[in-house]
Amino acid sequence: MSDTLRSGRTVVVGWDGFDTARIALALAAEHARGGGRLFCVHAYALPDGWMTPRSANLMLQEGMRRGEEVLEEARAAAEAVLDTDAVETELIGGDAARVIADVATVRGGDEIIVGTRGFGRARALLGSVSHELIHLAPCPVTVIPERVADRAAAAAEGSAAAAS
């Protein structure tokens, strides 16, 4: 993709704080450079109907608390690369794939970037956020597989060992 296509884009990144999400965020920030916007999205689980009101409330509070923590980390990482006003966070309850796709639709996303945690074949049969997102997204989706994070970690370990 040329630099012209990358700059000034509206990019939505799914954020859960895992290594692949960090790589997705770095790529998203790169693609949003040059006047673009970056939306970091974290979805938290909503309570099921069978929960008591007290349990449901506790679950919501914990989901929102955790979401605010991880999004603060994402904001700091993105703002290290982009202007502060180019980065926004979205904390929304619901199915992660649906939430990310909806944010991309509402915000006019040119691209969605997410990481995957590689739960293996069993998870692939049941569905995953990235797999579901491919079917829901209003724009292209880039998925960062766990192998990429593993390679980055191995390279960092090799660099650290060489420096010692």
Image (cartoon, grey):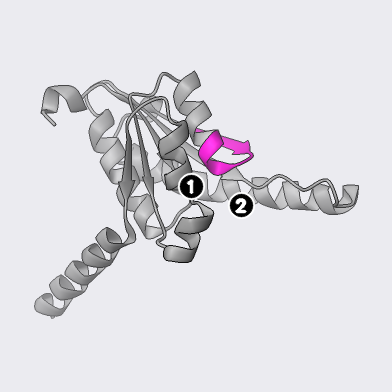
Residue 124 % position (x, y): 45, 57
- Amino acid tagged 1: Val
What stretch of residues is rendered in magenta?
Answer: 89-98
Horizontal side of 27 relative to 74 (left or right) equals left
At x 73%, y 48%, the residue is 61
Q: Quadrant of the C terminus?
A: bottom left
Name the residue carrying label 1.
Answer: 129
Q: Based on the displayed image, in which of its 4 quarters is residue 162 positioned?
A: bottom left
Element at label 2: helix
Give the alpha-carbon distance from disc 1 to disc 2, as whole Å.
Answer: 19 Å
- Front residue of this view, candidates 90 and 118: 118
Horizontal side of 124 relative to 37 (left or right) equals right
Name the residue carrying label 2.
Answer: 66
Q: Quadrant of the N terminus?
A: top left
- Whether 59 is drawn above or below 83: the answer is below
Q: Based on the displayed image, in which of its 4 quarters is residue 75 positioned?
A: top left
